[in-house]
Image: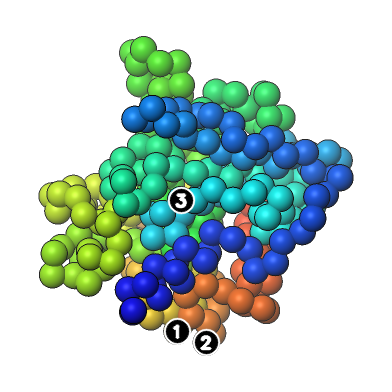
Amino acid sequence: MKSVFIATLLASILLPVCSLSADENVKITPDVVYGHKYGMALTFDVYRPKEKPNGAGVLFMVSGGWHSRWTDPQNMLGWFKPLLDEGFTVFSVRHGSSPKFVIPEVVNDVRRSVRFIRLHAKDYGVYPEQLGVWGGSAGGHLSLVLGTTSDKGNPKAKETVLRNSNRVAAVVAYYPPTDLREFVNEKSPYYHRFPALQFDFDLADDFSPVLHVTPDDPPTLLIHGDQDKLVPISHSENIMKQFQDQKVQAELLIIKDAAHGFQGEDKTRASQAVVRWFKQHLLKKQE
């Protein structure tokens, strides 16, 4: 029962606490295909403000326990409204989901999503160098992986999309796992609760953001509750120290008495911080 509870808790971050009905000020383009695997489509939904788009895009990682599920795009409007109200275009990105796929495969998917959006940025009314990424828990982990392990693309790749960079310009991560070495181990209870962790231990370093911080990483905001029992706050504290040592512009917002999955005033405070961070770091080139 405990494992079911934790899986349910992680999955719950995929949906907002409340949703809005159709918003005439937002144009939604659902199920854009950014790739295929095993005969299945990889998709994201696009949310574009109809009035005063600011030219910046934010990719939201739809991931809880590295499980990525589809929901009616209308149900996510409440989650994205604060960004949309400020003119941001939001991309709600789904990846190949656990339990079918493990983390190395999931990371390939989200990297591809950035490349695809950069390649087609003009179609979405965004600037290719003004893309941010945001997610919570597993989605926060994926956001940090994108922030700390980006590449310029492969100029010799046959697929045009793979020739594009997967670098992002700003990152926000809620309560993210930052060191997978303690989880990718058969003795760890997390290993058995979350099938996406069941990959070769020798690869755990490659997908642990805390080990890949370098001075050229994008500005990163971490938001964590000090009473989080699922992903201890030490994960954010440890990578924050690395950001500080490498002189990366970063902040750690600690929400007192908050556990995993923000609610009420904590959710509002975190959401306001997300908007502030992306306004500060994605729009400054237009000032």
- Identify the disc placed on residue 16: none
**Residue at label 1?**
227
**Helix, strand or loop for disc 3:** loop
Instruction: Determine whether 162 is above or below 247 in the image.
Output: above
Task: From the viewer's perspective, tell me whether residue 101 is left or right of residue 140.
Answer: left
Instruction: Determine whether 113 is above or below 85 in the image.
Output: above
Task: From the viewer's perspective, tell me whether residue 141 is left or right of residue 83.
Answer: left
* Amino acid marked by disc 1: Gln
Q: Residue 37's spot in the image, x, y percent?
A: 37, 30
Q: Residue 253's spot in the image, x, y percent?
A: 54, 72
Say whether residue 252 is visible: no
- Which residue is rendered at x = 31% and y = 45% of the image? 101
Mark 3: few/some/many CA within 10 Å (<14, 14-19, 20+): many
**Helix, strand or loop for disc 1:** loop
CB under 8 Å between discs 3 and 1: no
Q: Earlier in the sequence, mark 1 or mark 2?
A: 1
**Residue at label 2?**
257
Task: From the viewer's perspective, tell me whether residue 177 is left or right of residue 283.
Answer: left
